[in-house]
Image: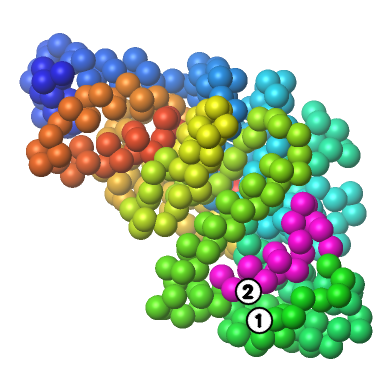
Amino acid sequence: MRAALPALLLLLTPLNARPQNHAPTPAEIALDSHTYDLQTNGRIFLLSEAKKNNYFLLGELHGDNEIPALLHTLWPDLWHNGYRYVAAEVSPWTADQLESANPSEHIEGLWTRRQADDLHAIAGPRSHILWGCDMEEIHPEYLIRELARLNPAYPSLQQMDALTKSGYQRSMTAQLLQLAAAPPQHDKTINDISLYKSLLATLQIDSFRSVPTTKMAAQQDREQLMKTQFLAHLRAHAPARVLLRFGRNHLHRGYDARGISTLGNFIAEFALSRGETTFNVGAFGAGGKATLMGETFSMDETADEPTFALLASRAKYAATVFDLRPLRPFLHAIPQEKRTPLESTLIYWSDAYDAIICYKNVTPLSE
């Protein structure tokens, strides 16, 4: 394996600084021979890996057209191969609204109604596919409104409803939590989860977010909520393959740089305990823009991560899929004290994700 180290170092050398006419190195061959065009053989590669595994974890971008388009392309084949549910970074209440034939509220956020309809195009309109596995980030007042409707004689809920009538603000959380302390007489299970417990968890996490010294607790509680809600859905439904669609920072194997985002690692270990397997694929942008909640922002992430800059420089297609697993032996053969910053981030990303998709130009989400 020692002979592979110079090869890896050459792979990491900028193309214009290499000796002319150098022969391809083993490391270059390992990476370039496992690079695919998402529109053709990359799609085949992802579907093949999904078929081999029980859980397909997609660490997505947010606010773009590319990920919804990818799911539109993959879902019919995933369904054919036994995938029946999509665990998503939305609340159980929002998941229910997205799947409802008569939604009571307008939904904003990471999913659109059109994206949810895509899931049902092959599964049928009465099927329940979407699992809400998160807090209600955008409209907690809708949960309050529903609980107040179920409990018209419950003064605390009526006060909460009145307080949030013009919209929810994070500054309200302390007062709302105090009013919500006692469980109401009437609760409702929505998308497999107690409506009251979902609201309580949302308010608790938001209360931690409002204070700088407890932001870490907010992140930890949110990850814990994602895990417990995922398990609740899994217990409520017959065994089936599951696609997980969350932001890229949630679905790593291992821990992220903050040491908080462990959902992907939890799923991998949980699957192992059941004799099942996972495949983790992430996505990043090398250019373009995305739009979320009315805000448009750059999706060129190459300055954020040396690994992204390297992969973007070697991306051959508009959307290039890199299988990172063949790089692991080369990378881990480098003694830790001799690793460059780039090598360290390559180890991080190739351990965290089995594959990664580089989108050269990300486009803002449109309905």
Q: Nearer the viewer, residue 53 or 321?
A: 53
Name the quadrant containing residue 216.
Answer: bottom left
Give the amino acid at mark 2: Leu
At 70% across and 30% down in the image, what residue appears? Answer: 240
Neighbour tally class for label 1: few under 14, some 14-19, many 20 plus, Cα within 10 Å: some
Q: Residue at x 22, y 20 (%)?
A: 27
Q: Residues within 10 Å of mark 2 (few under 14, many from 20)?
A: many
Q: Is residue 118 visible?
A: no
Q: Which numbered disc covers residue 177? A: 1
Please provide the residue range marked out in magenta: 188-205
Question: Horizontal and vertical percent for residue 161?
Answer: 79, 81
2 and 1 marks in contact (CB < 8 Å): yes
In this figure, which residue is indicated by the disc labeled 2? 203
**Residue 167 location (% of width, % of height):** 71, 78
As helix, strand or loop, the secondary structure at mark 2 comes to helix
Give the CA separation, mark 2 to mark 1.
6 Å
In this rendering, does residue 88 appear at all? yes
Query: Residue at the spot x=21%, y=15% of the render?
Result: 26
Residue 236 percent across, percent down from the top left: 76, 44
The foreground one among 356 and 180 is: 180
Tell me: residue 9, above or below residue 111.
Answer: above
Horizontally, is 102 left or right of 288 in the view? right
Disc 1 marks which amino acid?
Leu
